Image (cartoon, helix red, strand yellow):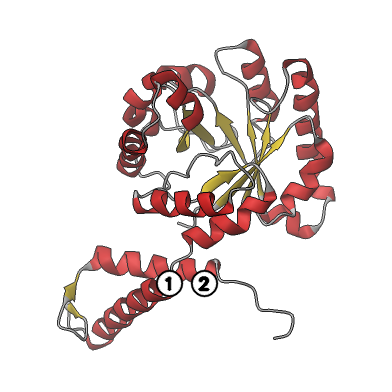
Amino acid sequence: MNPPVTWLYVPGDRPERFGKAVASGADVVILDLEDAVAPARKDEARANAVAYLRSRGDGPPGDAAVQVHVRVNDLATGRGRADLEAVAELADGVRLPKVESPAVLDTVLGSAADPTAGAPAYALLESAAGIVAAREIAAHPRVAGVALGEQDLAAELAISDEHAMNHLRLQVVLAAAAAGLPPVPMSVHPDVKDAAGLLASCRAGRALGLFGRTAIHPRQIPVIRRAFRPDAEEVARAAEIVEAAERAERTDTGAIALPDGRFVDAPIVARARRTVALARRLADPPSPDG
């Protein structure tokens, strides 16, 4: 599994930004038809998204490596259902806002897992009802991932304490893991000029089991990558574990022992291998001077 680290929102009514977003370095670009678009421009935004998705084959070859998702409008509305119908066969993924029950997903997606039935669906949990039903939503056969809509959730619950929000985050992390889904990405950091706050917030989220983050400006992407990149100590420790595991495999000794005498089991080895791979993936590119 190689989950995305950076997800960049771009308003659906700003088509001149679509190509720039794809070239920004983000792993996933999300064309937003919902919160970022004024009501009077939502039909225009949908048309822009459809046109761009249909034209993607005409862009630079590197563009195809970046996933393009679409966040549709509320599925309880006719507009949201029309959005989904328009983009489901074109986008690499669809983000469904305000999901509160698996029954809603049955209605708009169907209850059976069918890889030919449209783009992978990502359920956004943005309300108390969504959090309460998180396990059932994550286990829905058509759901490819879940994420939190923290600003809406905090407003509904009148939460201003990070400890309370962490409790809700952990519930979603647990629901995703139990359903075998990719790790849950963090919600947006709304202050695009606050790089230090973004970095600290990402590191705190990483400690909770969250992975990656949605962004609202390209300048946030390098900060997010830095926050989720394993540091030198983590990489050294993981490499030691991987080396011990490979030595045990070569000698067919079974038990995996580290130089300091500690024994590790298969899940620890698997995590160490992921850490080494992630460090390589997020390594800084070589400087032009070599």
Q: State whether residue 245 is above or below residue 163.
A: below
Instruction: Give, as a three-letter code, the residue at label 2.
Output: Arg
The answer to whether residue 158 is seen in the rendering is yes
Quadrant the C terminus occupies: bottom right
Q: In what element is the residue under mark 2?
A: helix
Q: Nearer the viewer, residue 129 or 223?
A: 223
Q: Residue at x 65, y 34 (%)?
A: 70
Position of residue 226 in the picture relative to residue 26 (left or right): left
Q: State whether residue 166 is above or below residue 209.
A: above
Quadrant the N terminus occupies: bottom left
Instruction: Give, as a three-letter code, the residue at label 1.
Output: Val
Q: Residue at x 21, y 84 (%)?
A: 252
User: Label 2 near label 1: C-beta < 8 Å?
Assistant: yes
Q: Quadrant of residue 103?
A: top left
Q: In what element is the residue under mark 1?
A: helix
Q: State whether residue 280 is above or below residue 188.
A: below
- Name the residue beneath numbered marker 2: 280
Q: State whether residue 203 is above or below residue 76.
A: below
Q: Quadrant of residue 76?
A: top right
Q: Residue at x 78, y 15 (%)?
A: 40
Q: Quadrant of residue 282?
A: bottom right
Residue 94: mark in rendering: none
- Name the residue beneath numbered marker 1: 276
Q: Residue at x 14, y 82 (%)?
A: 261
Local packing at callout 2 (Cα closer than 10 Å; few below 14, some 14-19, many 20+) is: few
